[in-house]
Image (cartoon, rainbow, N blue to C red):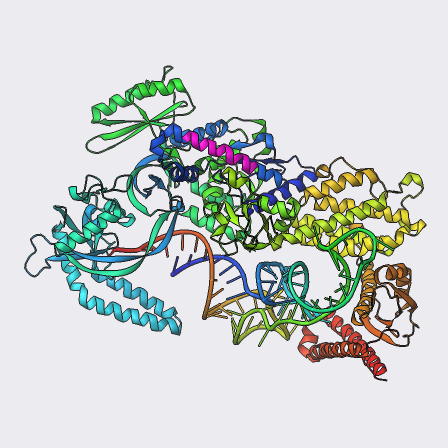
Amino acid sequence: YTIVIPPPNVTGALHIGHALNNTLQDILIRMKRMQGFNTLWMPGTDHAGIATQAVVERRLLEEEKKSRHDLGREGLVKRIWDWKDKYEARILGQLRQMGCSCDWQRTRFTLDDQCARAVREWFFRLFQDGKIYRGKRLVNWDTFLQTAVSDDEVFHEATKGHFWHFKYPVIDPKPGEPTHVTIATTRPETMLGDTAVAVHPDPASAFDKLSAELHEKLVKATAKEKVEIEELVTKLTDRRTAMQSQLETLRDMAKRGVLLELPLTGRNIPLIADEWAKPELGSGAVKITPAHDANDYEVWQRNQQIGAINILNPDGTLNESVPQKYRGLNVKKAREAVVANIEAAGLLVAIEDRDIDLAHSDRSKTPIEPYLADQWFVKMGNTDYGVQDENGRIEEIHDAGLAQSAMDAVTDQRVKIVPERYRNGYLDWLGEKRDWPVGRQLWWGHQIPVWTKKFQGDEERKKVEAEAYSVDAQAYDKERIYFYHQWQNPTFEGEAYLCIRCEDAKLEKEVESRGYIREADVLDTWFSSALWPISTLGWPNETPELKKFYPTSALVTSRDIITLWVARMVIAGLYNVGEVPFHEVYITPKILDSYGETMSKSKGNGVDPLDVIDKFGADALRFGLAYLTTDTQDVKLTVDFECPHCGAQFAQTKKNRTLPRIECEKCGQPFSTQWAEKPEDKALPRAAAVCERFELGRNFANKLWNAARFSLINLEVYATATDGGGFMESMLLLEDRWLLSRLATVTQQVSEALEHYRFADAARTLYDFAWNEFCSFYVEMTKARFAVAEQRATAQRMLAHALDVLMRLLHPMMPFLTEEVWQLLGQVAPERGLAKPQAACESVCVAAWPEADAARQDAAIEAQFADFQAVLGAVREARQRQNIAFKEELEFTVRCDAATAKLLEPMQPYFKQMANAKAAQIGPTAEAPGVPVSFPLSGRQGPIEVHVDVSRFIDRGAEKKRLEKERENLTKQIGSIEGKLNNQGFVDKAPAEVVAQQRDKLVEFRGQLASIEGSLAKLAG
RNA sequence: GGGCGUGUAGCUCAGUUGGUUAGAGCGCUUGCUUGACAUGCAAGAGGUCACAGAUUCGAGUUCUGUCACGCCCACCA
């Protein structure tokens, strides 16, 4: 049974979200280990390329006012390694303190040699396979980090902006034709890179299509929607009347090849016809900037002749392809200048205010500039190609592609996603089969193992190719080094690429001596993460680990990386090893802060698990987390700081939660937080994190500890089979059989819940059983039994057994407490079990997982015990209602059938023990005492009436009030049942047993009502 | 625009396939130094299960619609 840890990023310390994720993994691993599986929990961390470099660079700038260029590649990478060492140690320390039972000696890092070997191998195979290519693509350019970031690393934020309308003069318009074309933009500076203006090729049919769509909608629309749609129809018609002929004129001009003057640049650009121009929007004409807009890029792809002009430098300033006066300006300045100059030229038509959804880089938080750049891609879609066999025949190979392989794995359940609803997102994302841009212009990561050389002309191309094939001294070996090139017709301007499979300094030098230059870019972090399940097991070597532990069993992770990580692991596993990397994926809930925001390292709103452990203990943290892991419900955690000086608690706020030191709101003294870095801050006492949700776990741990302590004290005089106190089935009392029955059920429920990732169910079941049944009843009852010599041995053996099973069941969730109790229990009761005692093993973490003994499950016994609990409850309620102190002994009688009386009779000591009460009479003829407080109960065999003698204490008013309330309640119930039974439909159609149940209930309630009436009459009299 | 999720006690949340009087923890009220535990024990108050309709003998649970909130994806000259 294997789990690979989702390797935490070394960007920073772990927060509660990670604590949840890792606790759940540890629970699974510990249970499986106890079940006898050969378990492996593979630990490690992720270099998190862009995120880590961003963090280190930002600190460098803040603390030393230096940029990465001041340090150079080597210097910066050294700094990042220092950072990594520090945070990796901290992360692993956090995991250890949480009790994570990883195989620590196997700890890996996505940038270590073993992972690097795997990365290079996969890259080489893809390269060889034609799935890696280089292309000019529009990328999301982060001008701060000066790298491309993927769509997934971009977030959109609404900002207030403007919508500028410019007009471009038409060159040589015919009479009657417009002299200007109006366009609109939210990014005016990009006009410097315009290469065309587009209008729709067929406005009439575009309008037709739009109105057809609207009418189709109208048919299905609700009344409310109809009004809206009709409005739209009117608008569209109006617009068509006003615009169509004008747009058609423009279209005709485009077809004729009319040019426009692009203001400020001295360039002329064509007016073209392309469907991207929407006749229903704006002026119907749209400027085309292929190098800086994704849609315009597409237009360019369809209209190659217009070309593309990249106007930006990597740092976000304007480059030499714009007129002199704009060069070197940043986007903001350039925008102001362009708008001012357009206005001066009299070409500014209007400025509108507008909310703009602006793309920002997730890492640097700066606006993204769409930017045309060379990028490496992994092809995700299908490839078809021919392979020549030895006879020279060409065989067509169809390869469905990487994305399809990963989709199939989930569709046919080789990988099960739990909860299932997350399948859709996975399949939809892969279904797009978008190529994966894998290069990052960073210094922290796996450098792309490709060497490139430019060439020009066919002659040079041939030379380069020949040269490549002679690089390897032993002759060109496609298994060590792979070559491909691409060029542009008709100039043969192109690039040759060599990929080297393994790190090989000599070979690399050889390649470089021929004028090849190594790619500076590094690979996207997810490229190495995708290999995690196999690289950690030693792939590409065929290690014993890989054979034994792959495919892994379960992956426990967060929903926001299902696509980025999970899907790509499936791809990499299938591609490289031919098998899925894991059979099940469990998606955890998300931990939100008190504002409902997800915890994240970059926001700094994460709560350090160590601060929780400090206050409540690791077991409390773990149990609390398991307790709230329901069906992937997100969970809000409200967290307070606890002042280490005065103990005052106050809320973590957006302001204070990222500070290294805080002054207490009450006593004013400073304390440190997880963010403390400077020695003077670290020297301060640190605040604990207080959270109500973990109090439950802390209290539970305390309860268990005390129950164990009580048990241990009373087991010290342990009676083993050898000292005469041997276990005999016949010695078991009702409460023993009840406990064994419950224990069997609980064992079964907990095992099943954990098997199906229902962590909260398991935790709740254990909590309720341990607290409300084991402690509140069984342990309590042993007190009376230990006083009786002939019952002691059985009670002790039972108690040791129950504690033993409970500790084993709780161990995955609470490893610390259970281990401690296990050791102590081993001292007083080295042999455990009922009929056949056996020596306990030396640690609970390798003890056998309890098996549910179905033979012990007994509903009748449980019902009988419930009768006892009900009678006890009645006595206790009488005491409370009448406000009688515990030290005052009460007397009561129980009128019930003979069988129940036989059960209750032996319970006398417990009534004394647990309610300080004594049953004067039990049985069918039991009389109510002089001044009774009466409780009609529903027993298993029939009605049970409990009459508590309160003659010494009676508070008539209170009792009357209680009885009246009870009477009202019963009357309501009876009415409701009578209603049901008078309903012929119910009697006819409901299952017979449900009807019978209602009939029984009615009889019983009527009896109880009569009893209440009697008591009320007696009270009045 | 497409998809997913959520709305149950003052708060944070459970509630399996429809079937007794809808539960827990915290908070609140009352009473307890009962010999493992005041991080505890005992008792109690507190709910029109967002709203409307439908299906059904019967709906917190199924279906449709409405409202509110959250997340993901796409688009936005």
Residue drawn at x 44%, y 43% is A404
In the rendered image, residue A976, in percent from the top left (x then y), is placed at: 70, 77
**Principal secondary structure, stretch drawn in magenta:** helix
Residue B21 on image: x %, y %: 69, 70
Residue A673 seen anywhere in this rendered image of the structure? yes
Q: Nearer the viewer, residue A227 or A33?
A: A33
The answer to whether residue A851 of the structure is visible from this angle is: no
In this picture, residue A343 sits left or right of residue A498: left
Q: Is residue A379 left or right of residue A937?
A: left
Q: Is the residue A128 above or below the residue A372 in the image?
A: above
In reply to whether residue A206 is colored magenta, the answer given is no
Where is the C terminus of chain A found, in terms of image quarters?
bottom right
Which image quadrant is residue A915 in? Answer: bottom right
The residue at 43%/48% (across/down) is A429
Q: Is residue A611 above or below residue A915?
A: above
Residue at (38, 70) in percent of width and height:
A221
